[in-house]
Image (cartoon, rainbow, N blue to C red):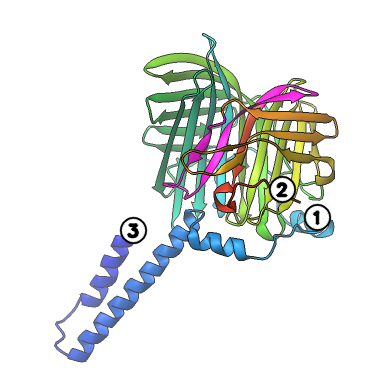
């Protein structure tokens, strides 16, 4: 029921029946209407404070809160062991948790030599009113032109299914079965993407080294999340720019994450990298709104399996920053990654990869394709989230 319908129903409930000439009864009725209107206003405010992920008041609360603390190894094992293990393909489907997203990113190659960075994501937030948000971006890596689009709708525009998902809204489609995925988006500025992705069967269930159950990450006082990836979906399809359709192909990284965790109190630097030896690297560094690093971890994987990486084995060093001319937010877009196997340097193809989603999720983040050099070469995607709330764009510190 919409808020307007609730107002009308509440109003009709108290205005229905025999006429009342009593002044006291009329005054009481007006008082009740005012009371219910106030309740509705508070409810709507709470819905948007939660469902939009961030607002001024919640940011202030996050900044003034106590430092976020990771749990001890013993507590992490106990907390994660108490939860059911990852169950695929059933867990591809929506779960009804507080926060959930399905995410795709990668570099697409056209037959004529053009290359494109691409990401598309579906967010579902379950507050007092459930809503769904979709984001998509396409970057022409030759001329630097970037196309973005976003939409938001109440509820979940998905067809029912037990093994997979099927989100459709207007010209958007994000669909998956256990064997294949389909993506379609019409993007502002005259771009369009239509992809079919084949699942090669490789699934990486991420976990913190101290977690008992693969597929579970314990963020301490910020909650627990299920998280798995299919790092190399094989994509074929078509990209249209400036009215010209181009056949494309490439490896697409797929992420699915859900749980009862607080995105308002955390920022993150996230890497999804395809490396030249055939391995795949996922790294994340969480930080609080004071810029303190909360956790650094990740997973190195290949067709034989995966190994979790913990804080002491990984060091993320921020390099040069890019400052948005639109929002004045400074993002550390160049990084040095120190791993057990050696050092990797990460640089963006296109420094201007800011995504302003203030109209759908009330935040601004950086998301773009990157190239890798060092002991191995490669390509992938980098996401920088939380810098709009951090202030000053400083990189996280220990």
Mark 2 = which residue?
A: 216
| Residue 90 in picture, x, y percent from top left | 61, 41
Tell me whether circle 3 and circle 1 mark residues in contact (CB < 8 Å): no
Q: Residue at x 25, y 82 (%)?
A: 29
Tell me whether circle 3 and circle 2 mark residues in contact (CB < 8 Å): no
Q: Is residue 95 magenta?
A: no
Q: Is residue 355 magenta?
A: yes
- Give the mark nearest the N terminus, 3 or 1: 3
In the depicted view, which residue is nearer to us: 89 or 296? 296
Magenta extent: 351-379
Q: Residue at x 79, y 31 (%)?
A: 305
Mark 1 = which residue?
A: 77
| Outermost top residue | 112
Mark 3 = which residue?
A: 2
Q: Is residue 95 visible?
A: no
On screen, residue 133 above or below 192: below
- Give the mark nearest the N terminus, 3 or 2: 3
Determine crowd level at label 2: few under 14, some 14-19, many 20+ residues with C-alpha closer than 10 A.
Answer: many
Determine crowd level at label 1: few under 14, some 14-19, many 20+ residues with C-alpha closer than 10 A.
Answer: some
| Residue 258 in picture, x, y percent from top left | 61, 48
Position of residue 65 in the picture relative to residue 121 (left or right): right
On screen, residue 253 above or below 78: above
| Residue 15 in picture, x, y percent from top left | 21, 76
């Amino acid at each position: 029921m919409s808020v307007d319908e609730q107002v009308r129903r509440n109003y009709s409930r108290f205005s229905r029946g025999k006429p009342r000439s009593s002044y006291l009864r009329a005054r009481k009725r007006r008082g009740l209407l005012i009371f219910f209107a106030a309740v509705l206003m508070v409810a709507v405010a709470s819905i948007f404070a939660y469902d939009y992920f961030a607002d001024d008041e919640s940011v202030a609360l996050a900044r003034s809160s106590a430092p976020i603390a990771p749990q001890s190894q013993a507590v992490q094992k106990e907390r994660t062991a108490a939860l059911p293990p990852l169950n695929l393909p059933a867990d591809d489907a929506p779960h009804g948790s507080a926060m959930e997203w399905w995410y795709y990113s990668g570099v697409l190659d056209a037959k004529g030599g053009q290359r494109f960075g691409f990401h598309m994501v579906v967010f579902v937030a379950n507050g007092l009113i459930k809503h769904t948000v979709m984001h998509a971006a396409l970057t022409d890596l030759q001329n630097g032109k970037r196309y973005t689009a976003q939409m938001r709708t109440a509820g979940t525009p998905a067809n029912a299914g037990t093994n997979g998902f099927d989100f459709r809204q207007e010209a958007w489609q994000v669909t998956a079965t256990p064997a294949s995925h389909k993506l379609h988006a019409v993007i502002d500025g005259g771009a369009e993407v239509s992809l079919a992705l084949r699942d090669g069967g490789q699934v990486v269930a991420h976990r913190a080294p101290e977690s008992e159950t693969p597929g579970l990450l314990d963020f301490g006082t910020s909650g627990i999340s299920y998280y798995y990836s299919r790092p190399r979906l094989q994509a074929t399809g078509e990209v249209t720019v400036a009215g010209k359709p181009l056949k494309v192909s490439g490896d697409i990284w797929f992420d699915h994450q859900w749980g009862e965790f607080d995105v308002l109190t955390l920022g993150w630097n996230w890497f999804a990298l395809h490396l030249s030896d055939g391995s795949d690297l996922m790294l994340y560094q969480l930080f609080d709104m004071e810029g303190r690093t909360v956790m650094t971890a990740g997973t190195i994987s290949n067709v034989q399996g995966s190994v979790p990486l913990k804080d002491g084995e990984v060091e993320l060093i921020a390099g040069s920053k890019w400052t948005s001319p639109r929002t004045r937010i400074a993002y550390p877009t160049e990084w040095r990654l120190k791993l057990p196997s050696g050092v990797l340097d990460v640089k963006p193809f296109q420094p201007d990869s800011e995504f302003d989603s203030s109209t759908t999720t009330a935040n601004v983040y950086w998301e773009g394709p990157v190239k890798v050099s060092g002991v191995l070469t490669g390509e992938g995607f980098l996401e920088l989230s939380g810098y709009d709330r951090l202030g000053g764009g400083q990189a996280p510190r220990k």
